Image (cartoon, rainbow, N blue to C red):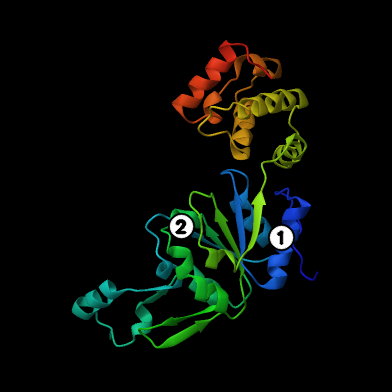
Amino acid sequence: MLNAFKQSSKYVASQDLMNSVNVAIALKKPLLIKGEPGTGKTMLAEAIAESMNMELIIWNIKSTTKAQDGLYVYDTVQRLYDSQFGEASVDDIRKYIKLGKIGEAFSSDKQVVLLIDEIDKADLEFPNDLLWELDKMEFYINETKETIAAKHRPIVIITSNAEKELPDAFLRRCIFHFIEFPNADKMYEIVNVHYPNLEQTLLQQAMEAFYWIRSMNDLQKKPSTSELLDWLQAMVLGGVDANTVAKDFPFIGTLLKKNQDIDTFRSYKRRGLRY
């Protein structure tokens, strides 16, 4: 496959994930990525851009985001201000059209990677409102009577934390991949990419403790890959003795972020329910 994605120096991707990326590129379809928070969904887009030497354009979705925001915004307030206080003419409406992230990706002179991050944060109609634009790779600007068509079809990566179900019509237009939480062997690979010189006793103790905590059934929020990396860094910076990790669990607040989860952890530890 020409111009195929391969894992970058800072991102460990499974063969299945690389295959999904390359199939999406070949079929010219968006790649929808789901998985637990902290499993590297956003970093995947960064890795694709790095691997393929492309610019990365990120559209961070919020609960208030509308599909229109990604296309363009007509700045009527600025035009009104200029008409009252500005010296230049306000007849050229194009000056007041501000492209959104999809508009930027379509207008780029080179192919880019477009990340639509956490699409499930928006309302239920948001994905359907983007069907035409992501399928046809164009949109219409009513104010200027212009059609903006993609000069080069961007590689579209869409992430979801599965907070809500996405519409079937939207799903049909995507290639789907679920990032499984890394097993211990894969996690060793990931950690070694970020911290290649980590003391091995510390790593082993931390990994055993980390997966033991994740095995607790009553946790509201299990610690993720990114939180394990933060925990390891905190212990290195804090000069923690590797032999005390399993006993003291230093800096537990880097792993567990809810009071109830810390209480659950302490209960397991107090009862001697160990890995």
Residue drawn at 60 percent across, 15 percent down? 248
Image label count:
2
Image location (x, y in percent) of residue 49: 66, 62
| Residue 71 visible in the snapshot | yes
Residue drawn at 35 percent across, 84 percent down? 143
| Residue 7 visible in the snapshot | no
Binning the other alpha carbons within 10 Å of mark 1 as few (below 14), some (14 to 19) or many (20 upward) gives: many
Residue drawn at 62 percent across, 11 percent down? 272
User: Mark number for residue 37?
Assistant: none
Residue drawn at 49 percent across, 31 percent down? 257
Q: Along the line of sight, which residue is nearer the eye, 186 or 151? A: 186
Image position of 63 with respect to 89: above or below: above
125 horizontally vs 29: left or right: left
Image position of 144 with respect to 31: above or below: below
Judging from the image, what secondary structure is the residue with disc 1 in?
helix
Marks 1 and 2, how far apart at CA:
23 Å
Q: Along the line of sight, which residue is nearer the eye, 94 or 174? A: 174
Q: Which residue is mark 2?
A: 61
Q: Are marks 1 and 2 in contact (CB under 8 Å)?
A: no
Image location (x, y in percent) of residue 253: 52, 27
Quadrant the C terminus occupies: top right
Judging from the image, what secondary structure is the residue with disc 2 in?
loop
Binning the other alpha carbons within 10 Å of mark 2 as few (below 14), some (14 to 19) or many (20 upward) gives: some
Q: Amino acid at mark 1?
A: Ser
Image location (x, y in percent) of residue 242: 70, 19
Mark 1 vs mark 2: give the one in front. 1
Q: Residue furthest right?
A: 1
Q: Which residue is mark 1?
A: 20
